[in-house]
Amino acid sequence: MTTALPAVTLAANQPDRFYRGGAAIADLRGAADAAVWGPEDWVASITTLFGQPRAGLSTLPDGRLLRDAVSADPTGWVGAEHATAFGDDTALLVKLLDAGQRLPVHVHPSNSFARSHLGCRHGKTEAWVIVGTSGPNPTVYAGFRDDVDEATVATWVSTQDSEAMLAALNPIPVKPGDTVFVPAGLPHAIGEGVFIVELQQPTDFSVLLEWTGFAEPGDPSAHLAIGWETALRCVDRDGWAGSRLDGLVMRTADQRSPVVPLFTEQAAPFFQADRIHADSAVDLDPSFAVLVALEGNGTLRTEHGGTVAVRRGDTLVVPHSAGSSQVDGGLVLVRCRPPAPETWEAS
């Protein structure tokens, strides 16, 4: 019989990144000095930065790496059904990401591309939960407006024509409460002043179409060390417009029900997320989950894993074996979970 594991409040986990940001993360967490905070906080991470052995991994309060704890007891952490499908892989990475400058135009590989060229079962489909914005025109960019041929993309990359690349993308104005689903292959960028909770598959695979100012010239990590000719094959060069583009975006700011789904079914093979409004007690089913507290000061009570005080800015990981849970105290949480079980074969 699996021993019940408690929910755990996690410290910040901010590996070095190649762009500016972090003030919004510091503000959310109540940190006094934003200068020491980087633009990303990897929450409940068993994933490392590309090409690095340890950077990016989350540490539990007892000093163990979460990766090692899950490996020692996958059933306790992720549940028997998930462990049968994924072993000791949580199949999820959650980040807080604060864009202090516009991020480069980049793209992530699909599952099939990752299996063929990177030796990994996971590509990097991701999604953005917008939790804060600043500046006059907070914007993200996703998908080419029109079909683009292979030679044009290759020329943009070789000449580093940033202006052309950005102009070819669809700008999407965003505000808190919006979500954007970003399937693997879709070229994209996040604009300055956009603060997100990002859910993604648990890899750090990014092909930097725009690397000037973000990576050193010739840095092989920009093309995942597989060469530009191969790396650019993962780019979705189709045009995205109209209802196809609209289908990537949800606007949920005016929804205040206890549990607000944040993505459509297209995200289910990769991850799940809800916004929880605990104006009164909200009951939650057993699941491995990552919680990000956006507002409030309340309590997480678990069936088998004890009780934890939760306040704005806290991030927590909840093992499956903690059982059903309940949150209260006016908390507003983003609850992030791994792929839906019924979709595992498709993913």
Image (cartoon, rainbow, N blue to C red):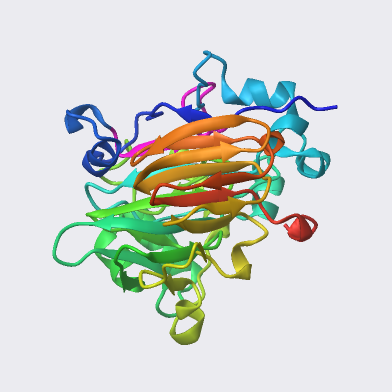
Q: Nearer the viewer, residue 284 or 226?
A: 284
Measuring from the top left, give residue 280's x and y in whole percent.
46, 56
Magenta segment range? 38-56
Measuring from the top left, give residue 11's x and y in whole percent.
41, 26
User: Which SS does the magenta portion mostly show?
Assistant: loop
For the image shown, how many numbered marks are present on the structure? 0
Assign the C terminus to one quadrant of the image. Answer: bottom right
Q: Measuring 22% from the left and 54% from the top, which residue is drawn there?
A: 193
* Observer able to see residue 127: yes
Measuring from the top left, give residue 160's x and y in whole percent.
30, 55
Residue 43 falls within the magenta-colored stretch: yes
Assign the N terminus to one quadrant of the image. Answer: top right
* Observer able to see residue 49: no
Q: Measuring 52% from the left and 58% from the top, which residue is drawn there?
A: 274
Q: Nearer the viewer, residue 136 or 234?
A: 136
Q: Return the residue found at the far left.
A: 136
Q: Where 25 sits versus 104, above or below?
A: above
Q: Measuring 40% from the left and 78% from the top, which residue is drawn there?
A: 145
Q: Quadrant of residue 33?
A: top left
